[in-house]
Image (spheres, rainbow, N blue to C red):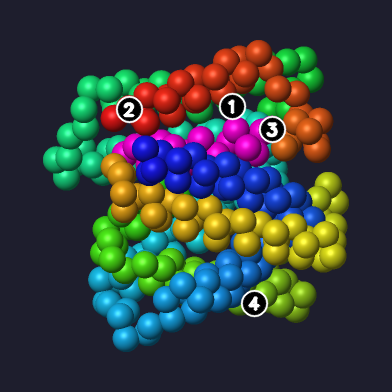
Amino acid sequence: MLSVILGVGGALVYGVSDFFGGLGARHLGALRVTWIAVFTGLVAVYLTFMVVDGDWSRITWPALMWGGFSGISGALGIMFLYASLAIGPMSIVSPLGAVVAACVPVIWEILIGHLLGPLSYVAILVALIAVVMVGFVKSEGAVRVNPRGIAFAVLAGLGIGGYLVCMSNTPHDSGLQPFLANRVIAFVVLSIAMLATWLVKLAHRRGIGHEGQPRADVVVGEHGEVNWKLGLIFAAICGVLDTAGNIFILEGVRMGSLSVMGVLASLYPAGTIALAAIVLKERIGIVQWIGMGLALAAIALLSLT
């Protein structure tokens, strides 16, 4: 039951975090926002580690290795997620990525021979249906997703799902060590990506290559405009919330099943869509409300397994 609470709590925090990440990407670009959010998260998890544990002698290589792998997968997943949210609409691309993210841990557990009880499979099926229904928008004037948005959402789901698989392989007594390694490696990977982007832009300014139109994964906005003030604020909020959500999920994975936790964590679109409806006035249809009800039913079933 506690693992279910942690999974649901992590999903809710994820949803709010992703909303701010998507807003930040609209003002600053997905790569920049992800870099700032990861740096903020690194500072937050370091301070948390020092308060909760602070014993560097207990750090083990398996914790660092799997945490590092999760940092690579998670960083790429979150970057593509924020890019897809920047293109929007959030109410479609967020659940699409969530479905893929939920499937990855389930497929992994099946491949390594772990079996769940019948009730768990029913709950997972209901949750997956809920995620799809939450992301189904049928209303006049609804914005359609372009192919790049769909591709980014799928890549985001693969990255987030891979993050969950890596975290599930960390030692259960390693505390926050894996997530500390996660943030460090993610920061390094994104810093390299930032440097590569800067070098490409520098080459364009010197007449090497053709810059073309602003891309949603680098510079966003209708005319490619950058707003550092809003982007920094949204990215910082996103980084702190993402860190909190990851800690919830990390502890939940250690207590319960990876497949179950993967599905629960993938319910994060509910929070993103709710905020998009309130703040951005994106319409929530009847099908989405039904999907949210099914999500609650799936949570209730999982709490019984």
Residue at image coords 75%, 24%: 283
**Image coords of residue 294 (percent x, y):** 49, 19
Q: Which residue is mark 4?
A: 199
Q: Nearer the viewer, mark 2 or mark 1?
A: 2
- Cα separation between marks 2 and 3: 27 Å
Q: How many marks?
A: 4
Q: Residue furthest bottom?
A: 57
Q: Which residue is mark 1?
A: 135
Among numbered discs 2 and 3, the one appearing first in the sequence: 3
Q: Nearer the viewer, mark 3 or mark 1?
A: 3
Among numbered discs 1 and 4, the one appearing first in the sequence: 1
Among numbered discs 3 and 1, the one appearing first in the sequence: 1
- Cα separation between marks 2 and 4: 53 Å
Q: Which residues are magenta?
A: 259-274
Q: Nearer the viewer, mark 1 or mark 4?
A: 1
- Look at the image and tell me in which quarter the C terminus lies: top left
Q: Which residue is mark 3?
A: 274
- Label at residue 304: 2
- Cα separation between marks 4 and 3: 39 Å
Q: Is residue 189 above or below residue 211?
A: below
- Cα separation between marks 2 and 1: 26 Å
Name the amino acid, label 4.
Leu
Q: Disc 1 on helix, strand or loop?
A: loop
Among numbered discs 4 and 3, the one appearing first in the sequence: 4
Q: Is residue 251 above or below residue 171?
A: above
Residue at image coords 14%, 40%: 113
Q: Does the image show residue 93?
A: no
- Cα separation between marks 1 and 4: 37 Å
